[in-house]
Image (spheres, rainbow, N blue to C red):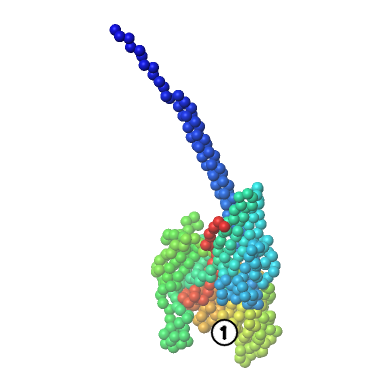
Amino acid sequence: MSNVTPRKMTRNDEGVALVLALCLVLVASVVGASLMLLSQTETYASLNYRTMTQARYAAEAGVHGAVNYLLNAYAPPATDADYGVFDTSKSPVQWNGAPVVLSSNPAVASNYPVTATVTAFNAAAGGNLGVGGPNVGYQASATMMSMTRFYDYGSGAQKVIQTWNITADGTTAGARPATVEVSATLEQQKVAFNMYAFFATNNQCGSLSFSGGEFTDSYDSAQLGNASAWSGGAVGVGVPLTTANNGNAGTNGNLTESGSGTVVHGTLSTPRTGVGKCSSGAIDALSQNGGATVDGGLVQLPQPVAYQTPAAPNPLPPTGNVSLNSCPPGLATCSTCSGGSPCGTDVTNKTTGVEITPIAGAHVLLGDIRLTGGSTLHLKAGVYDVNSISLAGNSNVVIDSGPVVFNVVGTGVTNPVDLSGGLEFNTTYNPENFQIIYGGTGGVNVSGGSAAALMVYAPNAAVKLTGGSAVYGAVLGSTITDTGGTGVHYDRHLPSEFATAWNTMLSSFSWKKQ
């Protein structure tokens, strides 16, 4: 056997554990540093988000401060002189050769003719949010883009509507400040007054009640200058021709109609649904019997329609029977039309015609107008603030020029408007020429007589139509009862002549980081 000497094994891996440990430490350090950087980034991101959110909320506070002031404290120009200093033909509206601006922002100068308004806006549209920590402030400016003045039929007064562009800055102080700009448009639009032959604001059964051959249809007063629009074949001869359509009725409640020949030549609009017997616990849209019809069908409104209550005249008219012993306030002249006593004769029981001519732009203040015994009252265009008006004994109201607007107050009178005894009134067949506006809850009685054209706006009153003749125009009341076949010929031209101010809206909302 030979002797074999074992070969000594050598090892070259000494120190590997140390290298691995160092690599692990390096990786852990990189991960740790990354986590620290990520944590710091998240912290800064959260801080930025918080400060930007605070700045945006502050800017929105500036917008809302401006809106709150413009809606609740700002007084638009009320008189011709105040309105006339603005150049409304341009957008933005101009004053003193520059855009009209209200501002609480030191970088944006105000330009408005009323110093008190500038001061009030500055206080209302600037300030700080109480959020704790660094200061969060806001400031805003509003530029008037448009301004329009018109007669608002719903309120019975001149209305000024405006569009404002509002820009507000919100700023946070501190180590990482932020500034956000928020813009919005505050606007109000003029819309056509939504008219019907009849509209009853009451939401109960029978708020509209037709019987005895009542009917609605329509005509167009804008066409009365054409011979083809008259039954006699010549302008002003006969009565206006009507068509069996567009005589729409509306109510927040129910229409109850009965009797052969009772027909609405148009639609019935109401938020109620269903046809049948109406009861307080189940108010439907339409109750019919005896062959009464609505030939245009039902239109369901999405919600009840709210109409403004007209403001009472200021100052209020006097009470007591009207006497023309001297010209009432607001009159240029008052005189007989033909052959009777001169100015100074009591209108009550007067058998000769009295004509009233208002001063341009002034309101005529009259008490209780009582026409009896064939009396005739001639009226020229103007606004008449009266306590009440009553026609009896085949009396007449003649519109010599229009429009004539009666703002009725009704103090101490059960039926502040009672035209049931009139022979005729407003034979122009243009209902715009004779408008009756009443905000109270008393009675309004109307009879067609031999010729009657008028508009009745009495959203809180009980309106009754009697007499069996026709009324040309439109009637609005809380409840409307039409008996005896008194028809209403709706004037299709009215919506193009009358407007109301729609709800104020905040639109075009946007924001950006500065």
Quarter of the view holding residue 94? bottom right
Query: Is residue 449 in view from this perspective?
Result: no
Q: Is residue 48 above or below residue 226?
A: above
Residue beneath label 1, please? 401
Q: Position of residue 432 (x, y in %)?
A: 53, 78
- Badge 1 amino acid: Ser
Task: Tell me if mark 1 has few (under 14), some (14-19) or many (20+) residues whose alpha carbon lies within 10 angstroms of its own.
Answer: some
The kind of secondary structure element at disc 1 is loop
Query: Which is more toward the observer, 385 or 362?
Result: 362
Quarter of the view holding residue 290? bottom left
**Left or right placement of residue 309 versus residue 239 in this view:** right
Where is the N terminus found, in terms of image quarters? top left
Q: Position of residue 103 (x, y in %)?
A: 64, 64
Query: Which is more toward the observer, 327 or 468?
Result: 327
Q: Position of residue 324 (x, y in %)?
A: 68, 83
Residue farthest to the top, as pictured? 1
Residue at the image position 43 percent from the left and 68 percent from the top: 267
Query: Which is more toward the observer, 474 or 127?
Result: 127
Residue farthest to the left, as pictured? 1
Residue at the image position 69 percent from the left and 65 percent from the top: 119
**Count of labels shown?**
1
Quarter of the view holding residue 374? bottom right
Residue farthest to the front, as pictured? 2
Q: Is residue 47 above or below residue 329?
A: above
Where is the C terminus found, in terms of image quarters? bottom right
Q: Is residue 399 above or below residue 445?
A: below
Residue at the image position 49 percent from the left and 65 percent from the top: 251
Residue at the image position 58 percent from the left and 75 percent from the top: 88
Q: Position of residue 474 (x, y in %)?
A: 50, 73
Query: Is residue 260 in view from this perspective?
Result: yes
